[in-house]
Image (tube, helix red, strand yellow):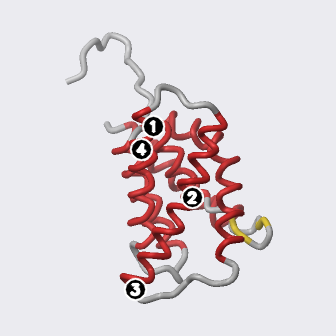
Amino acid sequence: MNAPGFRMAAIVGTMAVAQVAVFSQFRLGGVAVDALLCLTIAAGLTAGDRRGALMGFTCGVVADLLITSRPLGLSALGWTIVGYLVGRYQGTTTRSSPVVASLVAVVGTVGAVVLYLLSARVLAGLDLVGPQTVRVVAVMALANAVLVHPFTRLTRWIWVERSRPGVRFRV
């Protein structure tokens, strides 16, 4: 049984429902918070580069499926890169403070949006940059700076290793 896989599917599924039911309805300055992106950043911070990239790909595909106006795969591409890079950063530090985690969330959010806009332009021929782009990025980044803290608890729970009584070695 792959318990981390089941826990990851449960968290991503729950976040997808929360994204549609709560976060898309609760807008800050007219901007919806992107909980799945924040989950990607939190996974990179707590679980490293490979798991951050896996979470980024999974959440990106789910986000692309939820919002039909997005070309399929663009979020997954950018979020995989962001999850990986945040995880690489996490691998270079011993333990980060809450302020550093918030700053990483801001940088990761800005990076994900820039990657999305670039890939939309290059791969799909869409020009999504407009007068509201800076405001949207700023609100998303600030929201993710706050949400990254509870989301890191969720992602720690996904990949926690629990020893079973009587089992000493894992094969």
Which circle, 2 or 4, is nearer the viewer? 2
Determine the secondary structure under disc 2: helix
In space, the residues marked 3 and 2 are separated at their CA atoms by 21 Å
Q: In the rendered structure, which amino acid carries the disc numbered 2?
A: Thr
- Quick check: 145 above or below 18? above
Q: Which residue is mark 4?
A: 6
User: Which of the marked residues, 1 or 3, is nearer the chain's N terminus?
Assistant: 1
Residue at 51% of width from left, 40% of height from top?
Answer: 155
Q: In the rendered structure, which amino acid carries the disc numbered 1?
A: Gln
Q: Which residue is mark 3?
A: 124
Q: Which residue is mark 2?
A: 109
User: Which of the marked residues, 3 or 2, is nearer the chain's N terminus?
Assistant: 2
In space, the residues marked 1 and 3 are separated at their CA atoms by 32 Å
User: Which of the marked residues, 2 or 1, is nearer the chain's N terminus?
Assistant: 1
**In the displayed structure, does residue 166 sit left or right of residue 32?**
left
Name which quarter of the figure residue 73 lies in: bottom left
Relative to the observer, which residue lies in front, 163 or 31? 31
Residue 64, image x, y percentages: 48, 72
Determine the secondary structure under disc 1: helix
Question: What is the crowding at mark 2: few (fewer than 14 residues within 10 Å), some, or many (at least 20)?
Answer: many
Determine the secondary structure under disc 4: helix
Q: Are marks 2 and 4 in contact (CB under 8 Å)?
A: no
- Quick check: 85 above or below 61? above
Residue 80, image x, y percentages: 39, 58
Which circle, 4 or 1, is nearer the viewer? 1
Question: What is the crowding at mark 1: few (fewer than 14 residues within 10 Å), some, or many (at least 20)?
Answer: many
